[in-house]
Image (cartoon, rainbow, N blue to C red):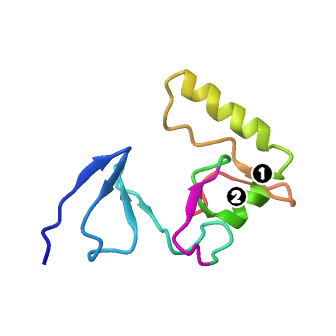
Amino acid sequence: MIPFILAAVGGYLIGDSTKSDATKMADGGVMDVKKCQRCHNDTHGVTTMSMFNEDIICMDCKEQEKKHPDYEKAVNSDIEEIKKGNYNFKGIGYKYANGGRVYHNN
């Protein structure tokens, strides 16, 4: 078996892929690449982080997210936080049609 080697790359830890199907993040969290954290459908291995919160979402959800009325506000807020040096901005929250706002969808 290949030894489990960890290397910090862009804030993520990459290890022996035989150990887990998920990517381990530097903060100890896990990014599940198989199921979208918003719609729970199969991601087919292609994901991105939401601009609204820390959800790891599929590309279908990303396309829907871009149509959200607050999308530009979410993007601009992220840019402003990065300019301030905040690279861990949690987002403005994702507002659903019922008015609820989700910051962490675990």
- The answer to whether residue 35 is left or right of residue 73 is left
**Taken as a whole, is the magenta stretch helix, strand or loop?**
loop
Rendered position, 97 above or below 18? above
**Which residue corresponds to the image point at 40% horizontal and 57% vertical from the top-left?**
29
Residue at disc 1, secondary structure: helix
The kind of residue on which mark 2 rests is: Lys
Residue 9 horizontal/vertical position (percent) = 33, 47
Quadrant for the N terminus, please.
bottom left
**Which residue corresponds to the image point at 70% horizontal and 38% vertical from the top-left?**
75
**Which residue corresponds to the image point at 26% horizontal and 63% vertical from the top-left?**
15
**Which residue corresponds to the image point at 51% horizontal and 71% vertical from the top-left?**
45
- How far apart, in angstroms, are the residues tagged by discs 1 and 2? 6 Å
Residue 103 horizontal/vertical position (percent) = 64, 51
Part of the protein shown in magenta: 42-50
Quadrant for the C terminus, please.
bottom right
Q: Nearer the viewer, residue 29 or 75?
A: 75
Few, some or many C-alpha atoms within 10 Å of disc 2 (few <14, some 14-19, many ≥20)? some
Q: Nearer the viewer, residue 83 or 88?
A: 83
Rendered position, 80 above or below 62? above
Mark 1 — residue? 66
**What label sits on residue 62 in the rendered view?**
2
Image quadrant where residue 96 sits = bottom right
Residue at disc 2, secondary structure: helix
Image quadrant where residue 102 sits = bottom right
The reply to whether dot 1 and dot 2 touch (C-beta < 8 Å) is: yes
Residue that protrudes farthest toward the top in the picture: 84
The kind of residue on which mark 1 rests is: Lys
- The answer to whether residue 59 is left or right of residue 66 is left
- The magenta stretch spans residue 47: yes
Residue 81 horizontal/vertical position (percent) = 59, 28
- The magenta stretch spans residue 9: no
Rendered position, 29 above or below 9? below
